[in-house]
Amino acid sequence: MVKLIELIDDFQLNQRIEGKKHFYISLCTTRLTRWRTYVETEFQIVDLEGVRPAHIKSYIQVCQGTGKEINSTINVSIATLRVFFNSLVEEEYLSEHENPMRRIKNLKEVKKVIVTFNDEEVSRILNDVKENTYSNIKDKLILIFLFDSGIRVSELCNIKTNDVSRKHILIHGKGSKQRLIYISKLMRKYMRKFEAIKKERFNHRPDDEIGEYYFLEQSAERLSRSRINQILKEHCKRVGVRKEVRCSPHDCRDYYAQKQLRNGIDIYSLSRLMGHFDTQITSKYLKGLEQEEVFKIGNTTSLLNYLKLK
């Protein structure tokens, strides 16, 4: 008999060995512990051998019954359980046939239209940032990164000076996946300004005090997620962005995705640029476009547009 609590501990250890982020490991452990506590309390199950699909379904039903979790949130817990049990199959604690998650499906989610910034709002936000101090130029470049590359806020915080080259930036994304993002002309222009004033700002400090991160606060400390949120919200409020836009860094990512689609990019290329594991994740951004816009994209990228016919 193998205890569930021991398997969860082992799963957590494997995640650390694989280099998964501490925040991700913590969330997975919390979800698995919550499920383990449920099956132990309700069914007196403490060993792997006692777990059946019915116990998973019962847990899902209880999550639905609380009224505190929407289906998309419950699906995240289902995904964590799926990863956990798949790992047990890989390590031969279970056969594929014995996997209780084998036939468990995700719940249907309400498809929401993504409301994000429009071009005019983005222009007002960027033009609202002055360029007369280190902080100003840093803040403006941060906003340009968010809007012009679709980068996640955590990825932006983790950019190191050595990750930046002349044409692209190495991004350390979710699940320890790496990808390259391009440097646009606008990004390059403000990166040069930022790098020059950054050198001047920290010229008096020894290298070991400056650290390895590209974006630094006035104190030479690494940039925080909360500070990026604050920068964006301050300028959104000042320029009067519509109330239905949350003004979070993820809204900048939504804007980037929809703008790229309007410009005719294909889903596969967009998926790679955004660091998605699956094109199905990327395809949700199509739902935020009006039908006429989708038709326009299809017409622009029509396969026969550039063929010469006699």
Image (tube, helix red, strand yellow):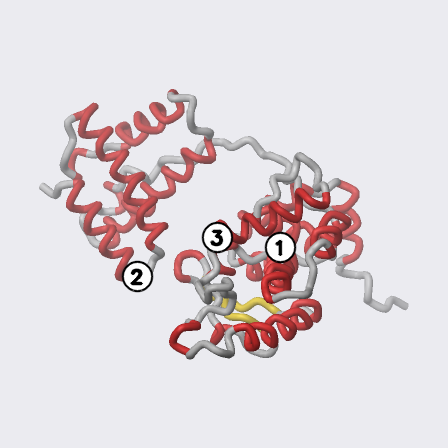
Closer to the N terminus: mark 3 or mark 1?
Answer: 3
Q: CA distance from mark 2 to mark 1?
A: 29 Å
Q: Position of residue 43 (x, y in %)?
A: 18, 25
Quadrant placement of the C terminus: bottom right
Crowd class of label 2 (few under 14; some 14 to 19; many from 20; radius 10 Å): few
Q: Which residue, given by chain and number where applicable, does mark 1 sit on?
A: 267
- Where is residue 182, by image quadrant? bottom right
Closer to the N terminus: mark 2 or mark 3?
Answer: 2
Q: Secondary structure at mark 1?
A: helix
- For residue 269, say whether it is visible: no
- Specify the label residue 2 is tagged with: none
Left or right, 282 with reference to 91: right
Tell me the kind of residue under disc 3: Arg
Q: Position of residue 185 (x, y in %)?
A: 70, 71
Q: Residue at x 82, y 61 (%)?
A: 305
Left or right, 291 with reference to 4: right
Crowd class of label 3 (few under 14; some 14 to 19; many from 20; radius 10 Å): some
Q: Position of residue 247 (x, y in %)?
A: 61, 43
Q: Secondary structure at mark 2?
A: loop
- For residue 217, say whether it is visible: yes
Q: Position of residue 267 (x, y in %)?
A: 62, 55
Q: Which residue, given by chain and number where applicable, does mark 2 sit on?
A: 18
- Specify the label residue 225 is tagged with: 3
Left or right, 174 with reference to 40: right
Disc tally is 3
